[in-house]
Image: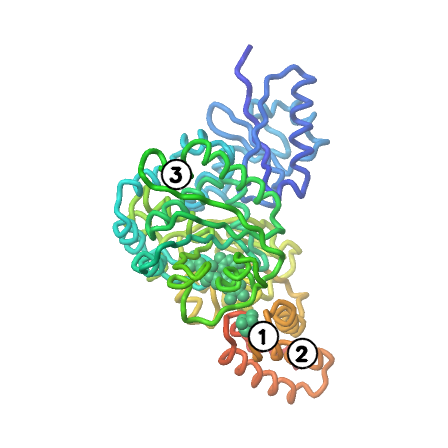
Amino acid sequence: MSRPVAVYVPCDAAALSVGADEVARAIAAEAEARHLPVVVVRNGSRGLLWLEPLVEVTTEHGRVAYGPVTPEAVPELFDAGFLEGKAHPLGHGFTEEIPFLKHQQRLTFARCGITDPVSVEDYRAHGGFAGLERALSMRPDEIVAEITRSGLRGRGGAGFPTGVKWKTVLDADAPEKFVCCNADEGDSGTFADRMLIEGDPFLLVEGMTIAALAVGARQGYVYLRSEYPHAAATLNEAIRRAYEQDWLGENIHGSGHDFHLEVRLGAGSYVCGEETAMLESLEGKRGIVRAKPPVPALEGLFGRPTAINNVLTLTSVPVVLARGAAFYRDFGVGRSHGTQPFQLAGNIQRGGLVELAFGVSLHDLIYRFGGGTASGRPLRAVQVGGPLGAYLPADQLDMPADYEAMAESGAMLGHGGIVVFDDTVRMDRMARFAMAFCAEESCGKCTPCRIGSTRGRELLDKIVARQDVAGNLALLEDLCTVMADGSLCAMGGLTPLPVRSAIRHFPEDFA
Ligand SMILES: Cc1cc2nc3c(=O)[nH]c(=O)nc-3n(C[C@H](O)[C@H](O)[C@H](O)COP(=O)(O)O)c2cc1C
Ligand code: SF4
Protein backbone atom coordinates (compact mmCIF):
# COMPACT_ATOMS: atom_id res chain seq x y z
CA MET A 1 0.00 0.00 0.00
CA SER A 2 1.30 3.48 -0.87
CA ARG A 3 2.20 5.97 1.87
CA PRO A 4 -0.77 8.00 3.15
CA VAL A 5 -1.09 11.52 1.78
CA ALA A 6 -0.97 14.19 4.50
CA VAL A 7 -3.85 16.64 4.14
CA TYR A 8 -3.71 19.69 6.40
CA VAL A 9 -6.92 21.28 7.68
CA PRO A 10 -6.46 24.10 10.21
CA CYS A 11 -7.88 23.84 13.70
CA ASP A 12 -7.40 27.59 14.20
CA ALA A 13 -10.51 29.38 15.51
CA ALA A 14 -10.81 31.52 12.35
CA ALA A 15 -10.89 28.36 10.22
CA LEU A 16 -13.25 26.59 12.62
CA SER A 17 -15.64 29.53 12.45
CA VAL A 18 -16.09 28.88 8.73
CA GLY A 19 -16.44 25.11 8.95
CA ALA A 20 -12.94 23.58 9.13
CA ASP A 21 -14.09 20.71 11.37
CA GLU A 22 -16.80 19.74 8.89
CA VAL A 23 -14.30 19.91 6.05
CA ALA A 24 -11.81 17.71 7.95
CA ARG A 25 -14.55 15.14 8.60
CA ALA A 26 -15.70 15.23 4.97
CA ILE A 27 -12.13 14.63 3.71
CA ALA A 28 -11.58 11.69 6.09
CA ALA A 29 -14.95 10.15 5.14
CA GLU A 30 -14.41 10.61 1.40
CA ALA A 31 -10.93 9.08 1.59
CA GLU A 32 -12.31 6.10 3.47
CA ALA A 33 -15.17 5.64 1.02
CA ARG A 34 -12.67 5.66 -1.86
CA HIS A 35 -10.19 3.44 0.01
CA LEU A 36 -7.50 6.08 -0.36
CA PRO A 37 -4.73 6.34 2.25
CA VAL A 38 -5.05 9.84 3.70
CA VAL A 39 -3.98 11.26 7.04
CA VAL A 40 -5.73 14.45 8.06
CA VAL A 41 -3.44 16.68 10.12
CA ARG A 42 -4.94 19.60 12.05
CA ASN A 43 -2.50 22.48 11.72
CA GLY A 44 -2.59 26.15 12.67
CA SER A 45 -3.63 28.80 10.19
CA ARG A 46 -1.27 30.19 7.54
CA GLY A 47 -2.99 33.51 8.12
CA LEU A 48 -4.66 33.81 4.71
CA LEU A 49 -7.99 34.26 6.39
CA TRP A 50 -10.08 34.98 3.29
CA LEU A 51 -9.16 31.50 2.03
CA GLU A 52 -10.13 29.62 5.20
CA PRO A 53 -10.74 26.77 5.49
CA LEU A 54 -7.47 26.52 3.56
CA VAL A 55 -6.73 22.86 2.91
CA GLU A 56 -3.20 21.85 1.97
CA VAL A 57 -2.09 18.62 0.36
CA THR A 58 1.48 17.38 0.64
CA THR A 59 3.05 16.63 -2.72
CA GLU A 60 6.55 15.71 -3.78
CA HIS A 61 7.36 19.36 -4.57
CA GLY A 62 5.65 21.03 -1.64
CA ARG A 63 2.24 21.71 -0.23
CA VAL A 64 -0.56 22.67 -2.59
CA ALA A 65 -3.37 24.89 -1.31
CA TYR A 66 -7.13 24.79 -1.88
CA GLY A 67 -9.60 27.20 -0.37
CA PRO A 68 -12.02 28.22 0.83
CA VAL A 69 -13.09 24.57 0.93
CA THR A 70 -16.62 23.54 1.87
CA PRO A 71 -17.70 19.99 2.80
CA GLU A 72 -19.78 19.96 -0.40
CA ALA A 73 -16.69 20.65 -2.52
CA VAL A 74 -14.74 17.70 -1.09
CA PRO A 75 -15.96 14.94 -3.50
CA GLU A 76 -15.17 17.06 -6.55
CA LEU A 77 -11.73 17.87 -5.13
CA PHE A 78 -11.07 14.15 -4.92
CA ASP A 79 -12.44 13.70 -8.46
CA ALA A 80 -10.08 16.42 -9.71
CA GLY A 81 -7.10 14.64 -8.11
CA PHE A 82 -6.34 17.10 -5.34
CA LEU A 83 -4.43 14.38 -3.50
CA GLU A 84 -1.80 14.72 -6.23
CA GLY A 85 -2.06 18.52 -6.11
CA LYS A 86 -3.94 18.73 -9.40
CA ALA A 87 -5.83 21.76 -10.67
CA HIS A 88 -9.27 22.75 -9.41
CA PRO A 89 -11.10 26.10 -9.34
CA LEU A 90 -10.42 26.24 -5.57
CA GLY A 91 -6.71 25.54 -6.10
CA HIS A 92 -4.01 28.16 -5.53
CA GLY A 93 -0.91 26.19 -6.45
CA PHE A 94 1.98 25.83 -4.03
CA THR A 95 1.11 27.48 -0.73
CA GLU A 96 4.52 29.07 -0.40
CA GLU A 97 4.11 30.69 -3.82
CA ILE A 98 0.86 32.51 -2.99
CA PRO A 99 2.00 36.17 -3.20
CA PHE A 100 0.39 37.09 0.14
CA LEU A 101 2.63 34.52 1.84
CA LYS A 102 5.62 34.50 -0.50
CA HIS A 103 6.48 38.15 0.10
CA GLN A 104 6.36 37.98 3.88
CA GLN A 105 9.35 37.74 6.22
CA ARG A 106 8.16 35.21 8.71
CA LEU A 107 10.36 34.81 11.75
CA THR A 108 7.86 34.55 14.60
CA PHE A 109 5.23 32.85 12.46
CA ALA A 110 7.76 30.74 10.53
CA ARG A 111 6.28 27.48 11.81
CA CYS A 112 2.64 28.52 12.15
CA GLY A 113 0.41 26.45 9.88
CA ILE A 114 3.26 24.15 8.95
CA THR A 115 3.44 21.91 11.99
CA ASP A 116 0.99 19.99 14.12
CA PRO A 117 0.64 22.58 16.93
CA VAL A 118 0.73 20.09 19.81
CA SER A 119 3.42 17.76 18.53
CA VAL A 120 6.74 18.25 20.33
CA GLU A 121 8.37 16.04 17.70
CA ASP A 122 7.11 18.23 14.86
CA TYR A 123 8.24 21.35 16.74
CA ARG A 124 11.71 19.85 17.22
CA ALA A 125 11.86 18.73 13.60
CA HIS A 126 11.30 22.35 12.54
CA GLY A 127 14.01 23.87 14.71
CA GLY A 128 11.97 24.22 17.90
CA PHE A 129 13.73 24.55 21.28
CA ALA A 130 17.04 25.53 19.60
CA GLY A 131 16.83 28.93 21.31
CA LEU A 132 16.16 27.39 24.70
CA GLU A 133 18.98 24.90 24.27
CA ARG A 134 21.36 27.79 23.69
CA ALA A 135 19.91 29.77 26.59
CA LEU A 136 20.41 26.82 28.94
CA SER A 137 24.14 27.11 28.32
CA MET A 138 24.22 30.87 29.03
CA ARG A 139 24.29 32.98 32.19
CA PRO A 140 21.17 35.10 32.88
CA ASP A 141 23.04 38.35 32.18
CA GLU A 142 24.27 36.94 28.86
CA ILE A 143 20.71 36.14 27.78
CA VAL A 144 19.58 39.64 28.77
CA ALA A 145 22.51 41.16 26.88
CA GLU A 146 21.63 39.13 23.77
CA ILE A 147 18.01 40.33 23.90
CA THR A 148 19.18 43.92 24.44
CA ARG A 149 21.54 43.68 21.45
CA SER A 150 18.73 42.35 19.25
CA GLY A 151 16.79 45.59 19.76
CA LEU A 152 13.63 43.65 20.59
CA ARG A 153 10.84 45.94 21.81
CA GLY A 154 7.52 45.03 23.38
CA ARG A 155 4.82 44.11 20.90
CA GLY A 156 1.95 44.67 23.36
CA GLY A 157 1.61 48.33 22.42
CA ALA A 158 4.18 50.58 24.06
CA GLY A 159 7.30 49.27 22.28
CA PHE A 160 9.35 49.26 25.48
CA PRO A 161 12.84 47.67 25.10
CA THR A 162 12.58 44.10 26.36
CA GLY A 163 16.22 43.88 27.41
CA VAL A 164 15.85 46.92 29.70
CA LYS A 165 12.76 45.42 31.34
CA TRP A 166 14.41 42.05 31.86
CA LYS A 167 17.57 43.64 33.30
CA THR A 168 15.44 45.45 35.88
CA VAL A 169 13.87 42.16 36.96
CA LEU A 170 17.20 40.33 36.90
CA ASP A 171 18.90 42.99 39.03
CA ALA A 172 16.07 43.13 41.58
CA ASP A 173 16.94 41.41 44.82
CA ALA A 174 14.00 39.19 45.77
CA PRO A 175 13.42 35.62 46.96
CA GLU A 176 10.94 34.97 44.17
CA LYS A 177 10.30 36.37 40.68
CA PHE A 178 7.69 35.77 38.01
CA VAL A 179 7.27 35.84 34.25
CA CYS A 180 3.82 36.74 32.95
CA CYS A 181 2.62 36.61 29.40
CA ASN A 182 -0.02 39.12 28.43
CA ALA A 183 -2.37 37.26 26.07
CA ASP A 184 -5.41 39.41 26.74
CA GLU A 185 -5.38 40.66 23.11
CA GLY A 186 -8.31 43.05 23.36
CA ASP A 187 -7.48 45.41 20.48
CA SER A 188 -10.04 45.60 17.71
CA GLY A 189 -8.95 43.79 14.57
CA THR A 190 -6.12 41.87 16.24
CA PHE A 191 -5.68 38.13 16.32
CA ALA A 192 -1.93 37.47 16.08
CA ASP A 193 -1.58 36.29 19.70
CA ARG A 194 -4.45 33.88 19.25
CA MET A 195 -3.21 32.60 15.92
CA LEU A 196 0.28 32.03 17.30
CA ILE A 197 -0.97 30.23 20.41
CA GLU A 198 -3.29 28.03 18.38
CA GLY A 199 -0.72 27.38 15.65
CA ASP A 200 2.63 27.17 17.46
CA PRO A 201 2.11 27.11 21.23
CA PHE A 202 5.51 25.56 22.03
CA LEU A 203 7.10 28.77 20.76
CA LEU A 204 5.44 30.63 23.62
CA VAL A 205 6.45 27.91 26.10
CA GLU A 206 10.02 28.21 24.82
CA GLY A 207 10.03 32.03 24.90
CA MET A 208 8.67 32.14 28.45
CA THR A 209 11.19 29.56 29.65
CA ILE A 210 14.03 31.62 28.18
CA ALA A 211 12.57 34.73 29.86
CA ALA A 212 12.46 32.86 33.16
CA LEU A 213 16.10 31.78 32.81
CA ALA A 214 17.06 35.37 31.99
CA VAL A 215 15.37 37.03 34.97
CA GLY A 216 15.62 34.21 37.52
CA ALA A 217 11.96 33.15 37.72
CA ARG A 218 10.72 29.64 38.42
CA GLN A 219 7.04 30.26 37.83
CA GLY A 220 5.18 31.77 34.88
CA TYR A 221 1.59 32.56 34.02
CA VAL A 222 -0.13 33.15 30.71
CA TYR A 223 -3.02 35.56 31.15
CA LEU A 224 -5.33 34.53 28.32
CA ARG A 225 -8.69 36.03 27.46
CA SER A 226 -11.60 33.66 28.04
CA GLU A 227 -12.95 34.55 24.61
CA TYR A 228 -10.18 32.32 23.21
CA PRO A 229 -11.33 28.81 24.28
CA HIS A 230 -9.50 27.06 21.44
CA ALA A 231 -6.26 28.84 22.26
CA ALA A 232 -6.71 27.86 25.92
CA ALA A 233 -7.22 24.19 25.03
CA THR A 234 -4.25 24.11 22.64
CA LEU A 235 -1.93 25.91 25.04
CA ASN A 236 -2.90 23.70 27.99
CA GLU A 237 -2.29 20.62 25.88
CA ALA A 238 1.08 21.95 24.72
CA ILE A 239 2.06 22.72 28.32
CA ARG A 240 1.01 19.21 29.40
CA ARG A 241 3.16 17.67 26.67
CA ALA A 242 6.09 19.98 27.42
CA TYR A 243 6.01 18.75 31.05
CA GLU A 244 5.77 15.17 29.80
CA GLN A 245 8.86 15.61 27.62
CA ASP A 246 10.91 17.48 30.20
CA TRP A 247 10.75 20.91 28.54
CA LEU A 248 8.94 22.28 31.62
CA GLY A 249 9.10 21.39 35.30
CA GLU A 250 12.02 20.57 37.59
CA ASN A 251 15.57 20.29 36.29
CA ILE A 252 14.67 20.85 32.60
CA HIS A 253 16.65 18.34 30.54
CA GLY A 254 19.16 17.91 33.34
CA SER A 255 20.12 21.60 33.28
CA GLY A 256 19.47 22.25 36.95
CA HIS A 257 16.85 24.88 35.95
CA ASP A 258 13.18 24.65 36.93
CA PHE A 259 10.25 26.42 35.32
CA HIS A 260 6.55 25.91 35.89
CA LEU A 261 3.91 27.39 33.63
CA GLU A 262 0.14 27.80 34.03
CA VAL A 263 -2.66 29.39 32.04
CA ARG A 264 -5.08 31.80 33.75
CA LEU A 265 -8.23 32.97 32.03
CA GLY A 266 -9.44 36.57 32.12
CA ALA A 267 -13.10 37.42 32.28
CA GLY A 268 -13.61 39.68 29.30
CA SER A 269 -12.33 43.10 30.30
CA TYR A 270 -10.29 45.28 27.93
CA VAL A 271 -8.52 47.09 30.74
CA CYS A 272 -7.24 43.79 32.16
CA GLY A 273 -4.77 43.89 29.26
CA GLU A 274 -3.15 46.89 31.00
CA GLU A 275 -0.29 45.23 32.82
CA THR A 276 -1.07 46.28 36.39
CA ALA A 277 -4.81 45.52 36.04
CA MET A 278 -3.72 42.15 34.65
CA LEU A 279 -1.64 41.54 37.77
CA GLU A 280 -4.62 42.36 39.99
CA SER A 281 -6.75 39.96 37.97
CA LEU A 282 -4.05 37.27 38.18
CA GLU A 283 -4.06 37.72 41.94
CA GLY A 284 -7.79 37.01 41.93
CA LYS A 285 -8.90 40.61 42.44
CA ARG A 286 -10.95 43.01 40.35
CA GLY A 287 -8.98 44.26 37.36
CA ILE A 288 -8.20 47.78 38.53
CA VAL A 289 -5.12 49.66 37.39
CA ARG A 290 -2.33 50.16 39.94
CA ALA A 291 -0.49 53.45 40.23
CA LYS A 292 3.12 53.35 38.98
CA PRO A 293 5.75 53.48 40.44
CA PRO A 294 6.52 50.89 41.57
CA VAL A 295 6.85 49.29 38.14
CA PRO A 296 5.91 45.59 37.89
CA ALA A 297 9.53 44.76 37.05
CA LEU A 298 10.28 45.65 40.71
CA GLU A 299 6.95 45.00 42.43
CA GLY A 300 4.63 42.97 40.26
CA LEU A 301 2.72 39.78 40.87
CA PHE A 302 2.17 39.28 44.61
CA GLY A 303 4.59 42.15 45.12
CA ARG A 304 7.49 40.28 43.47
CA PRO A 305 9.64 41.43 40.52
CA THR A 306 7.76 40.38 37.40
CA ALA A 307 8.65 40.40 33.71
CA ILE A 308 5.44 41.07 31.79
CA ASN A 309 5.51 40.66 28.04
CA ASN A 310 3.13 40.27 25.18
CA VAL A 311 2.80 36.94 23.33
CA LEU A 312 4.54 38.33 20.24
CA THR A 313 7.45 39.69 22.27
CA LEU A 314 8.00 36.37 24.02
CA THR A 315 7.68 34.39 20.81
CA SER A 316 10.34 36.56 19.16
CA VAL A 317 12.79 35.57 21.90
CA PRO A 318 13.54 32.00 20.70
CA VAL A 319 14.31 33.40 17.24
CA VAL A 320 16.80 35.86 18.73
CA LEU A 321 18.50 33.14 20.78
CA ALA A 322 18.54 30.55 18.00
CA ARG A 323 19.73 32.82 15.21
CA GLY A 324 21.59 35.48 17.12
CA ALA A 325 20.93 39.11 18.04
CA ALA A 326 22.64 40.45 14.91
CA PHE A 327 20.42 38.40 12.60
CA TYR A 328 17.27 39.74 14.27
CA ARG A 329 18.51 43.31 14.56
CA ASP A 330 19.15 43.46 10.82
CA PHE A 331 15.42 43.48 10.11
CA GLY A 332 13.57 46.77 10.41
CA VAL A 333 14.37 50.48 10.31
CA GLY A 334 15.73 53.04 12.76
CA ARG A 335 15.07 51.93 16.31
CA SER A 336 12.34 49.47 15.27
CA HIS A 337 14.21 46.19 14.89
CA GLY A 338 12.92 42.82 13.78
CA THR A 339 9.59 41.96 12.25
CA GLN A 340 6.02 42.88 13.14
CA PRO A 341 3.08 40.57 12.59
CA PHE A 342 0.56 43.02 11.10
CA GLN A 343 -3.09 42.06 11.22
CA LEU A 344 -5.27 43.19 8.32
CA ALA A 345 -8.92 43.48 9.29
CA GLY A 346 -12.14 45.41 8.76
CA ASN A 347 -13.31 46.23 5.25
CA ILE A 348 -10.44 44.52 3.42
CA GLN A 349 -10.41 42.06 0.55
CA ARG A 350 -7.63 39.81 1.84
CA GLY A 351 -7.69 39.92 5.60
CA GLY A 352 -5.04 38.04 7.51
CA LEU A 353 -1.62 38.00 9.05
CA VAL A 354 1.33 39.67 7.37
CA GLU A 355 4.70 39.45 9.11
CA LEU A 356 7.23 41.88 7.73
CA ALA A 357 10.20 43.90 8.88
CA PHE A 358 9.26 47.26 10.38
CA GLY A 359 9.23 50.05 7.84
CA VAL A 360 6.83 48.66 5.25
CA SER A 361 4.25 51.30 4.32
CA LEU A 362 0.63 51.05 5.39
CA HIS A 363 -0.23 51.46 1.71
CA ASP A 364 1.73 48.35 0.79
CA LEU A 365 0.14 46.38 3.57
CA ILE A 366 -3.39 47.42 2.68
CA TYR A 367 -3.15 47.29 -1.12
CA ARG A 368 -0.32 44.94 -2.08
CA PHE A 369 -1.16 42.38 0.56
CA GLY A 370 -4.76 43.22 1.49
CA GLY A 371 -6.05 44.04 -2.01
CA GLY A 372 -7.89 47.20 -0.88
CA THR A 373 -11.42 47.30 0.49
CA ALA A 374 -13.65 44.25 0.42
CA SER A 375 -16.59 46.40 -0.68
CA GLY A 376 -14.63 47.74 -3.67
CA ARG A 377 -15.54 51.27 -2.56
CA PRO A 378 -12.84 53.89 -1.97
CA LEU A 379 -10.88 53.56 1.25
CA ARG A 380 -11.58 56.46 3.57
CA ALA A 381 -10.01 55.73 6.94
CA VAL A 382 -7.69 53.30 8.64
CA GLN A 383 -7.38 52.77 12.37
CA VAL A 384 -4.00 51.45 13.42
CA GLY A 385 -3.19 50.17 16.90
CA GLY A 386 -6.55 49.14 18.31
CA PRO A 387 -9.46 51.15 19.70
CA LEU A 388 -7.10 53.72 21.24
CA GLY A 389 -5.22 54.22 17.96
CA ALA A 390 -5.52 57.16 15.59
CA TYR A 391 -7.66 57.24 12.46
CA LEU A 392 -5.61 57.99 9.38
CA PRO A 393 -6.98 59.30 6.08
CA ALA A 394 -6.32 57.64 2.72
CA ASP A 395 -3.64 60.19 1.75
CA GLN A 396 -1.42 59.34 4.75
CA LEU A 397 -0.91 55.68 3.99
CA ASP A 398 2.62 56.12 2.66
CA MET A 399 3.72 56.34 6.27
CA PRO A 400 6.20 53.60 7.22
CA ALA A 401 4.89 51.28 9.88
CA ASP A 402 7.48 51.65 12.60
CA TYR A 403 7.26 52.99 16.16
CA GLU A 404 8.94 56.34 15.57
CA ALA A 405 7.39 57.26 12.21
CA MET A 406 3.92 56.49 13.52
CA ALA A 407 4.47 58.49 16.71
CA GLU A 408 5.74 61.47 14.70
CA SER A 409 2.47 61.48 12.76
CA GLY A 410 0.44 61.42 15.96
CA ALA A 411 -0.46 57.76 15.52
CA MET A 412 0.71 54.52 17.09
CA LEU A 413 1.47 51.05 15.91
CA GLY A 414 0.20 49.36 19.07
CA HIS A 415 -0.20 45.63 18.61
CA GLY A 416 -0.12 45.93 14.81
CA GLY A 417 -3.87 45.82 14.13
CA ILE A 418 -4.93 47.63 10.94
CA VAL A 419 -8.67 48.15 10.51
CA VAL A 420 -9.85 49.48 7.16
CA PHE A 421 -13.02 51.53 6.52
CA ASP A 422 -14.50 52.51 3.16
CA ASP A 423 -16.22 55.79 2.29
CA THR A 424 -19.47 54.84 4.00
CA VAL A 425 -17.90 55.34 7.44
CA ARG A 426 -19.14 58.30 9.50
CA MET A 427 -16.24 59.59 11.52
CA ASP A 428 -18.36 61.49 14.07
CA ARG A 429 -19.85 58.09 14.93
CA MET A 430 -16.38 56.56 15.21
CA ALA A 431 -15.27 59.36 17.56
CA ARG A 432 -18.36 58.71 19.64
CA PHE A 433 -17.53 55.01 19.67
CA ALA A 434 -14.07 55.74 21.11
CA MET A 435 -15.57 57.60 24.06
CA ALA A 436 -18.34 55.02 24.51
CA PHE A 437 -15.76 52.23 24.48
CA CYS A 438 -13.69 54.00 27.13
CA ALA A 439 -16.80 54.61 29.27
CA GLU A 440 -17.64 50.91 29.01
CA GLU A 441 -14.14 49.62 29.72
CA SER A 442 -12.78 52.20 32.17
CA CYS A 443 -11.67 50.60 35.43
CA GLY A 444 -13.02 53.65 37.25
CA LYS A 445 -9.95 54.40 39.32
CA CYS A 446 -9.30 57.92 38.06
CA THR A 447 -11.72 60.77 37.39
CA PRO A 448 -10.53 62.03 33.97
CA CYS A 449 -11.22 58.64 32.45
CA ARG A 450 -14.21 57.46 34.52
CA ILE A 451 -16.21 60.69 34.29
CA GLY A 452 -14.51 62.15 31.22
CA SER A 453 -15.39 59.29 28.92
CA THR A 454 -19.07 59.48 29.82
CA ARG A 455 -19.13 63.27 29.37
CA GLY A 456 -17.23 62.79 26.09
CA ARG A 457 -19.80 60.34 24.82
CA GLU A 458 -22.58 62.78 25.74
CA LEU A 459 -20.82 65.63 23.92
CA LEU A 460 -20.39 63.47 20.84
CA ASP A 461 -24.06 62.47 21.02
CA LYS A 462 -24.87 66.16 20.74
CA ILE A 463 -22.35 66.68 17.93
CA VAL A 464 -23.78 63.71 16.00
CA ALA A 465 -27.25 65.27 16.51
CA ARG A 466 -25.75 68.57 15.23
CA GLN A 467 -26.54 70.55 18.40
CA ASP A 468 -24.26 73.55 18.91
CA VAL A 469 -21.46 71.76 17.07
CA ALA A 470 -18.83 74.53 17.47
CA GLY A 471 -19.48 74.93 21.22
CA ASN A 472 -19.50 71.19 21.89
CA LEU A 473 -16.35 70.61 19.81
CA ALA A 474 -14.53 73.25 21.87
CA LEU A 475 -15.68 71.58 25.08
CA LEU A 476 -14.68 68.19 23.71
CA GLU A 477 -11.18 69.46 22.90
CA ASP A 478 -10.85 70.71 26.49
CA LEU A 479 -12.01 67.36 27.80
CA CYS A 480 -9.53 65.52 25.58
CA THR A 481 -6.70 67.60 27.06
CA VAL A 482 -7.82 66.72 30.59
CA MET A 483 -8.08 63.02 29.73
CA ALA A 484 -4.74 62.91 27.90
CA ASP A 485 -2.88 64.79 30.64
CA GLY A 486 -4.65 63.60 33.76
CA SER A 487 -5.50 59.92 33.30
CA LEU A 488 -3.64 57.36 35.37
CA CYS A 489 -3.12 54.91 32.50
CA ALA A 490 -3.21 54.81 28.72
CA MET A 491 -6.87 53.75 28.63
CA GLY A 492 -8.11 57.26 29.44
CA GLY A 493 -4.86 58.83 28.27
CA LEU A 494 -5.08 57.56 24.70
CA THR A 495 -8.83 57.69 24.10
CA PRO A 496 -8.45 61.30 22.83
CA LEU A 497 -6.22 59.96 20.03
CA PRO A 498 -9.00 58.41 17.89
CA VAL A 499 -11.34 61.29 18.80
CA ARG A 500 -8.92 64.07 17.88
CA SER A 501 -7.61 62.33 14.77
CA ALA A 502 -11.16 61.83 13.51
CA ILE A 503 -11.88 65.54 13.99
CA ARG A 504 -8.56 66.65 12.49
CA HIS A 505 -8.54 64.44 9.40
CA PHE A 506 -12.28 64.32 8.68
CA PRO A 507 -13.58 67.79 9.66
CA GLU A 508 -16.42 67.51 7.14
CA ASP A 509 -18.03 64.83 9.33
CA PHE A 510 -18.17 67.29 12.22
CA ALA A 511 -19.41 70.29 10.25
C1 LIG B 1 -6.01 49.67 28.27
C2 LIG B 1 -4.82 48.85 27.92
C3 LIG B 1 -4.98 47.59 27.37
C4 LIG B 1 -3.87 46.83 27.05
N1 LIG B 1 -4.06 45.60 26.51
C5 LIG B 1 -2.98 44.81 26.23
C6 LIG B 1 -3.17 43.49 25.71
O1 LIG B 1 -4.30 43.05 25.49
N2 LIG B 1 -2.06 42.76 25.46
C7 LIG B 1 -0.79 43.24 25.71
O2 LIG B 1 0.18 42.52 25.50
N3 LIG B 1 -0.60 44.47 26.17
C8 LIG B 1 -1.66 45.26 26.45
N4 LIG B 1 -1.46 46.50 26.96
C9 LIG B 1 -0.06 46.94 27.22
C10 LIG B 1 0.44 46.39 28.56
O3 LIG B 1 0.07 47.30 29.58
C11 LIG B 1 1.95 46.19 28.61
O4 LIG B 1 2.56 47.35 28.17
C12 LIG B 1 2.45 45.04 27.78
O5 LIG B 1 1.78 43.84 28.06
C13 LIG B 1 3.94 44.83 28.06
O6 LIG B 1 4.46 43.82 27.22
P1 LIG B 1 5.49 44.16 26.05
O7 LIG B 1 6.60 44.99 26.66
O8 LIG B 1 5.96 42.84 25.61
O9 LIG B 1 4.75 44.91 25.02
C14 LIG B 1 -2.56 47.32 27.28
C15 LIG B 1 -2.40 48.61 27.81
C16 LIG B 1 -3.50 49.37 28.11
C17 LIG B 1 -3.31 50.73 28.67
S1 SF4 C 1 -7.33 55.87 32.87
FE1 SF4 C 1 -9.27 54.74 33.05
S2 SF4 C 1 -8.66 52.62 33.00
FE2 SF4 C 1 -6.81 53.81 33.47
S3 SF4 C 1 -6.72 53.96 35.71
FE3 SF4 C 1 -7.88 55.72 35.05
S4 SF4 C 1 -10.02 55.00 35.16
FE4 SF4 C 1 -8.75 53.19 35.17
Query: Which SS class for mark 1?
Result: helix
Between 453 and 74, the one nearer to me in the picture: 453
Q: Is mark 2 within 8 Å of ligand 2?
A: no
Establish if 423 lies above or below 511.
Answer: above
- Decide which of tag 1 and tag 2 comes sooner along the chain: 2
**Image quadrant of residue 470?**
bottom right
Which amino acid is tagged 3? Answer: Glu
- Please state, as top left, top right, bottom left or bottom right, where the N terminus lies in the image: top right
What label does residue 499 carry, if any?
1
Residue lying furthest front: 175
Between 223 and 26, the one nearer to me in the picture: 223
Q: CA distance from mark 1 to mark 2?
A: 10 Å
Residue at the image position 40 percent from the left and 69 percent from the top:
294
- Decide which of tag 3 and tag 2 comes sooner along the chain: 3
Question: Residue 109: x percent and y percent?
Answer: 46, 44
Query: Which SS class for mark 3?
Result: loop
Q: Are marks 1 and 2 in contact (CB under 8 Å)?
A: yes
Q: Is mark 1 within 8 Å of ligand 2?
A: no
Q: How many marks?
A: 3
Which residue in the structure is indicated by mark 2? 460
> Quick check: 234 left or right of 150?
right
Could you tell me if residue 290 is visible in this image?
yes
Of labels 3 and 2, the one closer to you: 3
Q: Residues within 10 Å of mark 2 (few under 14, many from 20)?
A: many
Answer with the quadrant where ligand 2 appears in the image.
Answer: bottom right
> Quick check: 362 left or right of 78?
left
Establish if 298 lies above or below 20.
Answer: below
Which residue in the structure is indicated by mark 3? 250
Q: CA distance from mark 3 to mark 2?
A: 56 Å
Residue at the image position 70 percent from the left and 25 percent from the top:
75
Which amino acid is tagged 1? Answer: Val
